[in-house]
Image (cartoon, rainbow, N blue to C red):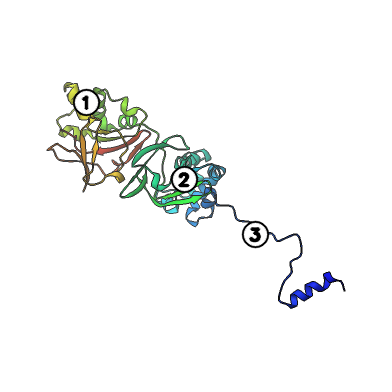
Amino acid sequence: MKIKQILPKILVGLGLVLFVGTGCKKDATPAPATIADIVNNNASFTTLKAAVEKAGIGSALSSGSLTVFAPDDAAFAAAGITASTLQTLTAAQVADILTYHVLTVKVGSADVPVSDGVVTLQGKKLFASRNANGVFVNGIKVKSADINASNGVVHVIENVLIPPTQTIQQIAAENPNLSLLVAAVSKAGLLNAIGAEGKLTVFAPTNSAFNAAGFNSTADINAASTSLITTVVSYHVLGTNVFASDLINGATATTLQGGTLTIGLTPPSVKITTSANPPSNIVLNGGINIVATNGVVHLINRVLLP
């Protein structure tokens, strides 16, 4: 018997094993999960997975460096959207909604600014904020942050983000209950300003709010001095986005007029800090967090007066 045949038997008898060949291959390391993988494999993302498939954007979520604000199944349910609902929409419509949830840069929760607007993959601005209450997008809370992927990060959110289609100017113009505000903004020469690109907040007094302040018609507004109307209107506009989630009791915000507003929470309200007038309450039933392409509108029940 040859040495080659005897040696393995001797080594086995000694409790040793001889591996013969060109070498051992190690198990391949699994590739890191992409954002698309996370969506496909998370049991809480079944509706989102169906939406991604419907929109045909799976490949877009597999590359690049992205941030995805991902609605889970509970978020879709809160928005009244089911897998059946998705089937009534075209692929383009679903893609329009989903790409509004995507940023083309990786942003961890700690890097979200106090208040800012950023353009999404869809093309319109998403308004993000971070405060003592957490991280928010368009006033919707991030409930689970920083799920890292090989091509970015996922933040799970509590509701679905619907892309806005109108500017603040257009929202006001189409709401018959804001006709006196539109007249006041026009007299102040600020109509174009609230229709321009930006990240504004407008506390919008309703017609009844103007009535209570002594302005019962457009004629009353036009009869007032331009400087008075300009001052009053400017007190209602902030130069940055402030959603209901950003309202902190006792906090202050600087207006376009240069004065300050003080925030209240019970109920949500604003008042000119130096004014003796009562606070203006935000109308909660459909009047809060009205998202525009250039900011947000909150309806209020009193005109802010010095």
Is residue 121 rendered to the left or right of residue 13?
left
Which quarter of the figure has residue 190? Answer: top left
The one nearer the camera, 127 or 33, is 33
Q: In which quarter of the image is the N terminus?
A: bottom right
Q: Distance between the residues labelled 3 and 1?
A: 72 Å
Sooner in the amino-acid sequence: mark 1 or mark 2:
2
Residue 181, position in %: x, y?
24, 30
Name the amino acid, label 1.
Thr
Three-letter residue code for mark 2: Val
Characterize the local packing of mark 3: few (<14), some (14-19) or many (20 or more) Cα atoms within 10 angstroms.
few
* Label 3 vs 1, first from the N-terminus: 3
Q: Nearer the viewer, mark 2 or mark 3?
A: 3
Left or right: 49 as drawn, with respect to 205 = right
> Is there any visible trace of residue 107 in the rendered image?
yes
Q: Is mark 2 on a helix, strand or loop?
A: strand
Residue topped by disc 3: 27
Tags 2 and 3 touching, CB below 8 Å? no
Residue topped by disc 2: 68
Q: Which mark identifies residue 162?
A: none
**What is the distance, in whole Å, between disc 2 and disc 3 at their CAs?**
32 Å
Q: Which of marks 2 and 3 is nearer the N terminus?
A: 3
